[in-house]
Amino acid sequence: LEIMPFASVKKKFIADGVFKAELNNFFMRELAEDGYSGVEVRKTPRKTEIIIMATRTQNVLGEKGRRIRELTSLVQKRFNLPEESVDLYAEKVAQRGLCAIAQCESLRFKLIGGLPVRRACYGILRYIMESQAKGCEVIVSGKLRGQRAKSMKFVDGLMIHSGDPTNEYVEKGVRHVVLRQGVIGIKVKIMLPHDPKGVYGPKKPLPDSVVVFEPKEEIQMKEKPSEMQYVSLTGPSPDTMGF
């Protein structure tokens, strides 16, 4: 086996990261109205598999798979990939309320529709907490009222901000909305619940979680001593000793 030099390995990782970032940016523009929630890239020696996560997968596929074929063609042209080397798949998000990007998009469309900021944010907050999330945080910043920019924070439940568990337990999403008064920034953070099956949240429990087990009932067994034990404890009688 040939060992790749460090510089080429470094370049490969950078190229993969740029490819995923550009794909994400492209799908964000194309599939914003279809509940686009992220992309996953799996590279094999023959093909590159691109999995699009969305809340409305039927819209992503299109009628008789027409739209997904168009997206495949656009990706091949944009990245100069050979034909039939890219496969696009659409995967439905397991729980929409636990996806930060989907909630960002939902809040974005509410604000574009003219809904007041507080009402829209509290609606998102309530929907996330009803989806069994441990906690959530919504920050909206920009010219919300008047000409001076400010930010509003809405928090509910438990939220961790530091340590390694934030990488697994905290989902983050950022979006921007262009309104008449200017650009509004949206940040959504969701703390996922612990799920032993790994569907709605991470399998690994939090390091500070303590499980208290119920004490077992102790059954006391009263045993009658046997005759041999009785003899050994009391010793021989005086009659048997010849007194």
Image (cartoon, grey):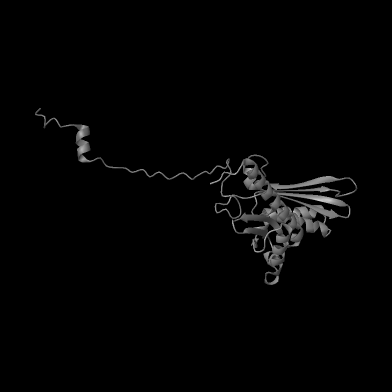
**Residue 138 location, x and y as percent?**
74, 49
* Lateral position of residue 207 relative to residue 118, left or right: left
Who's the residue at 71% across and 60% down the image? Answer: 75
Observer able to see residue 158: no
Left-right relation of 238 to 59 = left
Q: In the rendering, at what x and y percent does residue 8 appear?
A: 64, 44
Give the vertical position of 79 relative to 234 (above or below).
below
Q: Which residue is most to the bottom?
A: 64
- Across the whole image, how many numbered discs are drawn on residues? 0
- The image quadrant where one finds the C terminus is top left
User: As rendered, which of 204 and 17 lies closer to the eye?
Assistant: 17
Q: Residue 10, image x and y in percent? A: 65, 43
Left or right, residue 122 beside residue 130: right
Residue 227 in sight here? yes
Query: Residue 108, image x and y in percent?
Result: 78, 56
Query: Among all residues in the image, which is located at the extreme right?
Result: 147
> Which of the pair 127/34 is nearer the observer?
34
**Outermost residue, top side:** 243
Front residue of this view, candidates 93 and 47? 47
Residue reaching furthest front? Answer: 2
As drawn, 205 above or below 114:
above
Above or below 63: residue 191: above
